[in-house]
């Protein structure tokens, strides 16, 4: 998915590092098909999600050459347009499709700008800018990750019922986390957790976003 | 066989003993499983020491063993275990995670690629890193 970003930033001191919050065998076909030239790491216990308080995918963090965050975890170019999908025909209204494309393009161009210009890019935030946007975990979130880690271990040991109990504890403690919920939810034949329970949980958000939008400064239009 | 999951480690401890919500480990087991050193000052890591709570000290210690789960809970850090009390997760406390993020430094980690080769985030120092999470679900 990010290969085109990598191609368009060749020559810049930049790399994508993709983290699959996933079981290795579920991630494998996607990685092998995409054949990316950047590192794709497998995080079946969602440890990076715990470290950075990630709650969904795609979310991204921008990290400079010195290992400093210049953008905290944010939605990486996706929108809530899918919520307007017709659930029988699976089609989205045209304006939602256009908006999704626009948001993706804006985000992509911002990443490219930073890849090329680093700290000179207006999209790279200073420490205060990162701090004010950063969400940090609280005790229930930390507990949730412990139960999730246990659940994944139990599942690997073949103890599905006990794993389910632990997954439920995790998602109750950390209801914001779509990653925990979808990782442990029932999957369809494509491996997606997109059944009626998923839609019910999305609908229950009401006005709250599934993908919190990101404020990215748009490039000013050229003169004339 | 008791296993302890802590941070990136998954450590089997043949001499560990569980008793309900108590998990009794000796000094070596604690260090092997968690990286924390049990010293007279308390539980120490790098330049931080967490003292054992004075009132609970007798209840938490038994000869050369410490009820690490009790100390963990006392610290407000997450503890989870399976029904058989064989798999224990000693989680990192929320305050530690939050403090780490507040520094602005990107927390380091090590994860495998599909070939099982380990990579650290810090391997990429010197380049701008777009760290992006995705999934098949």
Image (cartoon, coloured by chain):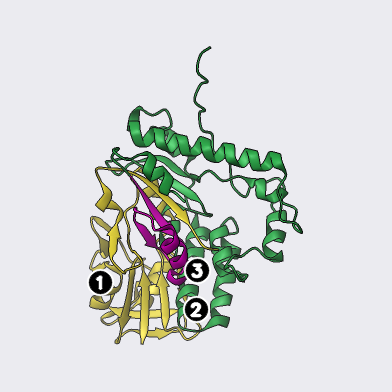
Chain colours: A green, B yellow
- Are the residues under marks 1 and 3 on the same chain? no
Q: Is residue A110 left or right of residue A66?
A: right
Label ID, residue A155 = 2
Highlighted magenta segment, given as a residue range: A15-44
- Residue at image mark 1: B31
Residue A16 within the segment the image draws in magenta: yes
Question: Of circles 3 and 2, which is in front?
Answer: 2
Q: Nearer the viewer, mark 2 or mark 1?
A: 2
Q: CA distance from mark 1 to mark 3?
A: 24 Å
**Which numbered disc flags the more N-terminal residue, 3 or 2?**
3
> SS at mark 1?
helix
Q: Residue at x 27, y 77 (%)?
A: B29
Label 3: state its secondary structure. Answer: helix
**Coordinates of residue A105 in the picture (x, y in percent):** 52, 37
For label 3, the residue is: A148
User: How many labels were placed on the picture?
Assistant: 3
């Amino acid at each position: 998915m990010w290969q085109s970003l990598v191609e368009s930033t060749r020559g810049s001191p930049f790399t994508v590092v993709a983290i699959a919050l996933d079981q290795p065998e579920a991630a494998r076909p996607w990685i092998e098909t995409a054949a990316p030239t950047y590192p794709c790491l497998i995080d079946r216990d969602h440890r990076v999600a715990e470290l950075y308080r990630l709650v969904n995918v795609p979310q991204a963090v921008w990290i400079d050459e010195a290992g400093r965050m210049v953008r905290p975890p944010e939605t990486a170019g996706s929108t809530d347009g899918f919520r307007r999908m017709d659930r029988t025909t699976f089609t989205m209204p045209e304006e939602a499709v256009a908006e999704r494309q626009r948001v993706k393009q804006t985000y992509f161009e911002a990443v490219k700008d930073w890849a090329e210009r680093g700290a000179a890019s207006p999209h790279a935030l200073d420490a205060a800018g990162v701090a004010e946007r950063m969400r940090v975990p609280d005790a229930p979130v930390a507990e949730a990750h412990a139960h999730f880690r246990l659940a994944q271990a139990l599942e690997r040991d073949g103890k599905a019922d006990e794993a389910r109990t632990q997954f439920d504890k995790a998602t109750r403690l950390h209801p914001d986390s779509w990653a925990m919920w979808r990782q442990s939810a029932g999957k369809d034949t494509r491996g997606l957790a997109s059944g009626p329970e998923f839609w019910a949980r999305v609908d229950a958000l009401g006005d709250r976003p599934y993908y919190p939008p990101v404020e990215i400064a748009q490039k000013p239009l050229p003169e004339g | 066989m008791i296993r302890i999951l802590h941070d990136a480690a998954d450590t089997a401890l043949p001499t560990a003993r569980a008793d309900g919500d108590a998990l009794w480990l000796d000094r070596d087991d604690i260090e092997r499983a968690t990286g924390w050193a049990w010293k007279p000052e308390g539980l120490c890591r790098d330049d931080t020491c967490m003292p054992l709570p004075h009132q609970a000290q007798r209840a938490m210690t038994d000869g050369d063993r410490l009820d690490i789960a009790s100390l963990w809970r006392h610290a407000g850090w997450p503890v989870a275990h399976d029904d058989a009390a064989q798999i224990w997760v000693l989680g990192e406390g929320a305050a530690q995670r939050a403090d780490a993020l507040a520094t602005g430094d990107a927390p380091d980690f090590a994860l495998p690629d599909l070939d099982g080769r380990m990579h650290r985030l810090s391997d990429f120092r010197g380049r701008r890193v777009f760290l992006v999470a995705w999934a098949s679900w």
